[in-house]
Image (cartoon, rainbow, N blue to C red):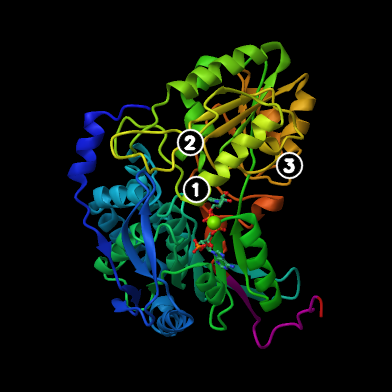
Amino acid sequence: MTAVTPSALEARAALALPYTEVDDMFIHGAWTPALGTDRNPVTDPATGKVWGSVPDGTPEDVDAAVASARGAFDGEWPRLAPSERAAYLLRIADEVDTRAKELSLTNTRENGSPVSESAGAAANAAGIFRYFATLAGYLEREDVRAFPKGGGESVVRRDPVGVCALIAPWNFPINLVVIKLAPALLAGCTVVIKPASPTPLSIRLIVDAVAAAGVPAGVVNLVTGSGRLGDALVKHPDVNKVAFTGSTPVGRKIAAACGELLRPVTLELGGKSSGIVLPDADLDAMSKVLIRSSMRNTGQTCYISSRILAPASRYEEVVDMVTATIAAGKQGDPLDPETMFGPCATESQYRTVLEYVESGLAEGALATTGGRAATLGGGLEGGYFVEPTVFAGVTPDMRISREEIFGPVLCILKYDDVDEAVALANNTTFGLGGLVFGRDPEAALAVADRMDTGSVGINFFASNHAAPFGGRHDSGLGTEYGIEGLNAYLSYKSIHRKPLSGPITPTIGG
Ligand code: NAP
Ligand code: MG
């Protein structure tokens, strides 16, 4: 049993977040009582104890929220100049900053992200709003394109796509909404947000920030409830676009529904990414970024490289470094600022992760550290903790090597030459993240170029607000972040014109 430090217990005692029972959702600019009476509990995964509850919304709540968003889309919001909407984004960012502490604590109590992680959530969210505000000029720039011949021209409009459904998972409950909300608002869209069932509370603080910034009623709406509610939202006749982050199986269902409806959809799904350690890699430098790049947020991060591919010539050295680094990361109360690894976010995720750990052991992988549930004291006995686990001797056919685990489990595979490393990295149905560790920048870039994935880091990984982020293959459709992420909320219109007295313009196509 690992001791819990007094500082963590003091932090837990000082938290004083009251038992939080809410009965409303945000509709038409006001916190509005839910129409049904069913509720969903909110559980602290560090203790396994319920600490609040929210309404389990009904299709009627979805109707009300979508009607509110539709009304606002028919109003002034899409007709404001983009720079006017950008001014709202900047005000929201300031309001988010003032809620940083509450956001961090609420997030940590909802999903067990260590406070060292959630402390950055507000700054990151505010940064996303501020970044998208800088793109107002892109939307305002006149775009007039001449016909190749004949004297006519086309005025290209970037219209907002309409009412958007924003559906998020529980692992980064603030960021994964805000990365949709900020570009949607700048584009002139109106939205209905549905957070994941385990994490319905922290996003309320973002909605509060939106309200405090004076965003007109109906532009942003929030409903809480289960996947059934998400399904009703996706298929609602008055929704024009769906932006979803979550698992690949649910993503497929949403893609099928949107295909039938011919409704634009952005899907950010699961991953199984690889970190290729080149023979010249600096293992000390790699050790410093390892947890962030391969086990961030207790392994519950979509793009992390949870498969380390090590050259046979240095395999033992890599296994020793990875094992020592992971074993040295403190696991404990996520409210303790020293904690690197918290609990799994939900009981079902805890069971899934333990099942993967058992399958790794059964298939003959060697756990060099971890390999079982963790039992913590100090009030955390009921928490969903799994010991951070490193598996060596992993082969490509093992389930732990092929499937997304989404927990604190790393696999280390062996390769003989760089071609084999690239083939191993690409031998997955996913294509979301990836890493290359190496000292020679040219060689590392050449390997990164050969990886069939949406993002690759060289010697570190982070997402950049200004660069597109998205998955290939089973990891999704479309991108978020950057101008490309803004484009997902636009609908183009070309207005063709020529002087009435001018020559006849040849038409192209049918
Ligand atoms: P999930 O089970 O797919 O749920 C995601 C969201 O969809 C939740 O709000 C969920 O509601 C809702 N939902 C469930 N069924 C639905 C349906 N039929 N129609 C519409 N919405 C539905 O995913 P999760 O377990 O929360 O999150 C973990 C997954 O997210 C992992 O696979 C991870 O890789 C992925 N992820 C991807 C990215 C990325 O950017 N690519 C980032 C982070 C996470 P309930 O919670 O109420 O079921
Ligand atoms: Mg789920």
Question: Which tag, 1 or 2, sits closer to the chain's start?
Answer: 2
Specify the amino acid type for callout 2.
Val
Question: Is the stretch drawn in magenta largely helix, strand or loop?
Answer: loop
- Return the mark for residue 498: none
Instruction: Determine the CA span between mark 1 and mark 2.
Output: 35 Å
Q: Report the quarter where the C terminus lies.
A: bottom right
Q: Residue at x 39, y 47 (%)?
A: 45
Q: Which percent across, then down, holds residue 451? A: 71, 36
Query: Which residue is under mark 2?
Result: 386
Q: Which percent across, then down, holds residue 374? A: 44, 33
Residue 160 visible somewhere in the drawing: no
- Residue 271 drawn above or below residue 458: below
Instruction: Determine the CA span between mark 2 and mark 3.
Output: 25 Å
Magenta range: 491-508
Instruction: Determine the CA span between mark 3 and mark 1.
Output: 27 Å
Secondary structure beneath dot 1 equals: loop
Query: Which residue is under mark 3?
Result: 428
Secondary structure beneath dot 3 equals: loop
Specify the amino acid type for callout 3.
Thr
